[in-house]
Amino acid sequence: MSHKERNGVRAAYVHKAEHLEARMEMMQWWSDYLDVSREGYVAPYIYARRHKAA
């Protein structure tokens, strides 16, 4: 297809950049979850229900 990146290395970095914000949000959620889990086990789905993103 004409809109597809022809350089494989460049395509990999462009793809990463496209989703960088979503990845950062996901990693922040995971970090927050691990902090809460230090106090005692909380299932990820229960934590997610209690701490929905605004």
Image (tube, rainbow, N blue to C red):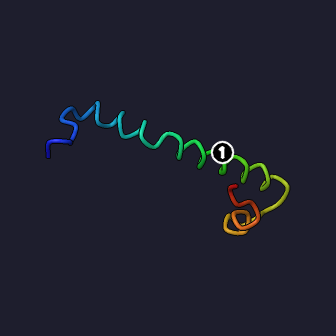
What residue is rendered at 29% in x and 36% in y? 11
Total numbered labels: 1
The amino acid at mark 1 is Gln
Q: Is residue 29 above or below residue 14?
A: below
What residue is rendered at 73% in x and 63% in y? 47
The quadrant of the picture occupied by the C terminus is bottom right
Closest to the observer: 8 or 4?
4
Closest to the observer: 19 or 35?
19
Label 1: few (<14), some (14–19) or many (≥20) C-alpha neighbours in 10 Å: few
Residue 29: % across, % down: 66, 50
Q: Is residue 54 above or below residue 31?
A: below
Residue 48, located in which quarter of the rendered image? bottom right
Residue 41: % across, % down: 78, 63
What residue is rendered at 20% in x and 42% in y? 3
Residue 27, located in which quarter of the rendered image? top right
Residue 39: % across, % down: 85, 55
Question: Which residue occupies the extreme left position in the image?
Answer: 1
Q: Is residue 46 above or below residue 20?
A: below
Residue that numbered label 1 is attached to = 28
As helix, strand or loop, the secondary structure at mark 1 comes to: helix
In this picture, residue 25 sits left or right of residue 46 = left
What residue is rendered at 53% in x and 46% in y? 22
